[in-house]
Amino acid sequence: MNRKKLQKVTDTLIKSCKHFNKYEVNCLITLFYNLVGDVAERPGVAIGLDRNAFRNILHVTFGMTDDMIMDRVFRGFDKDNDGSVSVSEWIYGLSLFLRGSLEEKMKYCFEVFDLNGDGFISKEEMFHMLKNSLLKQPSEEDPDEGIKDLVEITLKKMDQDHDGKLSFADYEKSVREETLLLEAFGPCLPDPKSQLEFEAQVFKDPHDFNDM
Ligand code: CA
Ligand code: CA
């Protein structure tokens, strides 16, 4: 990207991103272009992080391990759904990741957990995600039965209007009562430790970010 165009993008991001100051936006943009590497810009093709590159960052930098959740996080960042995280999607996504309010985080997590995007977290979706995140634990005789029980328990706790699935209203009410339920179906936000390490390193010197 030529300097003039980059300056314009940077200025827009600084103005529109309420959680980062000018210095931080600049650091994160520098990091973005370091991560993207020397990709030649082609007309009509946006420079960005593709699914694999992005998942690698989630894994190495933010300690995520769950493939299904990482895919959903990628979708959450890739707002225009073009298969790559652009520089503005990177800044907006990280602003939520690192500084988001509870409201912003609830909206984001709900979208991650609503696997088919129909506005509800169904029993099947819960089962899918819980099974996926619990597989690492020692297996019981019939793990599916245990997970089905867990789905019922979770539903009983969170399904406020008792229609057998979670709407955003159900989810929001439950999370406000018990914040731990924010990531009820799998970790999709960075844990506090990797978040602190990331910020300490990137906001000190983004050129020096060598952990990838
Ligand atoms: Ca995109
Ligand atoms: Ca759904």
Image: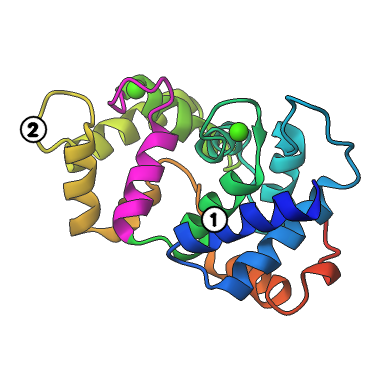
Does residue 177 appear in this view? yes
In depth, the one of 149 and 50 nearer the eye is 50
Residue type for callout 2? Asp
Residue 26 in the image: state x and y as whole percent: 67, 67
* Residue that numbered label 1 is attached to: 12
The picture quadrant where one finds residue 107 is top left
Residue 121 in the image: state x and y as whole percent: 31, 28
Which stretch did the figure color magenta? Answer: 102-122
Does residue 190 appear in this view? no
Q: Looking at the image, do the residues carrying marks 1 and 2 touch, with CB atoms under 8 Å apart?
A: no
Q: From what the image shows, is residue 114 above or below residue 18?
A: above
Q: How many labels does the image show?
A: 2
Residue 134 in the image: state x and y as whole percent: 52, 39
Q: From what the image shows, is residue 188 above or below residue 75?
A: below
Magenta region includes residue 9: no
Q: In which quarter of the image is the C terminus?
A: bottom right
Indicate left or right for 189 with 2 as reference: left
Residue 23 in the image: state x and y as whole percent: 62, 75
* Residue that numbered label 2 is attached to: 161
In depth, the one of 19 and 45 nearer the eye is 45
| Residue drawn 32% across the image and 20% down it | 118
Separation of marks 1 and 2 at Cα, in angstroms: 42 Å
Residue type for callout 1? Thr
